[in-house]
Image: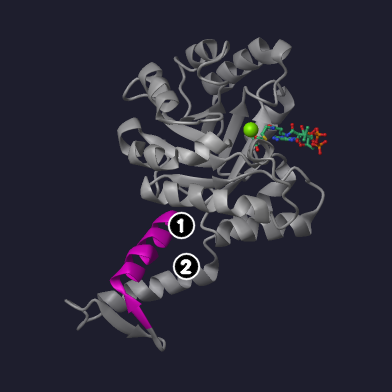
Amino acid sequence: MMASPMSRCRSALFLPASNARAIVKARGLPCDAVVLDLEDSVAPEAKAAARDAARAALHDGGFGPRLLVVRINAVDGEWAEDDLAALATAPPDAVLLPKVDGVATLRMARERLGPNGPAVWAMIETARGIMALPEIASAAAELRLGALVAGTNDLALDLRCRPGPDRAPLLPALAQIVAAARAGRMLALDGVLNVFDDPDRLAAECRQGADWGFDGKSLIHPAQIDAANAAFGPTEAEVGRARAIVAAFASPGTEGRGAIRLNGEMVERLHLMEAERVLALVE
Ligand SMILES: CC(C)(COP(=O)(O)OP(=O)(O)OC[C@H]1O[C@@H](n2cnc3c(N)ncnc32)[C@H](O)[C@@H]1OP(=O)(O)O)[C@@H](O)C(=O)NCCC(=O)NCCSC(=O)C[C@H](O)C(=O)O
Ligand SMILES: [Mg+2]
């Protein structure tokens, strides 16, 4: 399944591919995407075993409708060649590249995966990655990029900023990631919250990500899934409003009209397009 701007990815659960129990568990969790990690959550001495486990998980399947994504090691590093080879016989829906800092890395990955290989997702988690967002968005269709994923831990380190619960120092970069994703018709996924025993902070951070335009959030623990699914919706109210807008534009007399009146508000055809997108996500 190729993630498209119409795909729903409210919750992308990362797990170290070296954790067999987590892989089993992920097959039954209500997340929209499972990300088998070969990069930072796997110690150097466990890389080979994690790669074998990811390969086995891809062959065994059982992830149902969830998007299956593998985060490989840095494309220009010592492990990536073997990582990509491990995905060849049972490819995932997408290959997530860490620390993408320009189009060259993405092009290299696309060449190795082949033009019809899995979608490429890019982690934006360095200052250089932020500066490269316009060129990445421009190359998105050609390179079949499916998502931009904010790596807020690495990004905070690289920017040398100190985000607190409101994440204020990260917000300018996050807004640029969303803008690039929208320009390139990709999904935009927010970064992780490392704290997984603070439901109020999680709910607030999910809401913030949704308010700033993200489609979903990267997660590190099963306990975070429900909050992300709820925040990134669409909610019942949003679906109801979308249905009302579609029905209003389908009613007689609206042909040729760009703007109509609905429940005391002006709605335009741009709202109709958004309503259709919302309904496509749930239907
Ligand atoms: C953070 C953890 C190490 C905590 O693990 P643990 O102590 O085992 O948690 P629990 O005992 O509460 O686990 C309860 C059960 O849930 C399963 N579990 C835990 N985590 C996951 C998971 N991520 N996916 C699936 N299942 C999971 C446990 O196995 C328990 O199961 P059971 O025994 O059957 O009840 C751990 O949560 C963890 O490793 N999380 C993921 C870490 C990871 O992938 N990190 C990389 C992504 S973060 C990132 O990318 C940052 C980015 O690059 C950036 O720069 O910002
Ligand atoms: Mg990172």
Query: What segment is highlighted magenta in the picture?
Result: 266-283
The relative height of residue 49 versus residue 283 in the rendered view (above or below) is: above
Mark identifier at residue 100: none
What color scheme is it? one colour
Q: Of marks 1 and 2, which one's residue comes earlier in the chain?
A: 2
Q: Nearer the viewer, residue 252 or 184?
A: 184
Q: Quadrant of the N terminus?
A: top left
- Please, what is the three-letter code of the amino acid marked with disc 1? Val
- Residue at 48% from the left image edge and 40% from the top image edge: 131
Q: Are marks 1 and 2 in contact (CB under 8 Å)?
A: yes
**Residue 277 highlighted magenta (yes or no):** yes
Mark identifier at residue 282: 1
Q: Nearer the viewer, residue 40 or 10?
A: 40
The relative height of residue 208 versus residue 154 in the rendered view (above or below) is: below
Q: Is residue 277 visible?
A: yes
Mark identifier at residue 239: 2
- Residue at 56% from the left image edge and 29% from the top image edge: 98
Q: Quadrant of the C terminus?
A: bottom left
- Please, what is the three-letter code of the amino acid marked with disc 2? Val
Left or right of residue 96: residue 24 = right
Q: Nearer the viewer, residue 46 or 243?
A: 46
- Picture quadrant where residue 45 is located: top right
- For ligand 1, tell me if the residue under mark 1 lies within 8 Å: no
State the separation of the CA atoms marked 1 and 2: 8 Å
The relative height of residue 130 versus residue 264 in the rendered view (above or below) is: above
Q: Residues within 10 Å of mark 1 (few under 14, many from 20)?
A: few
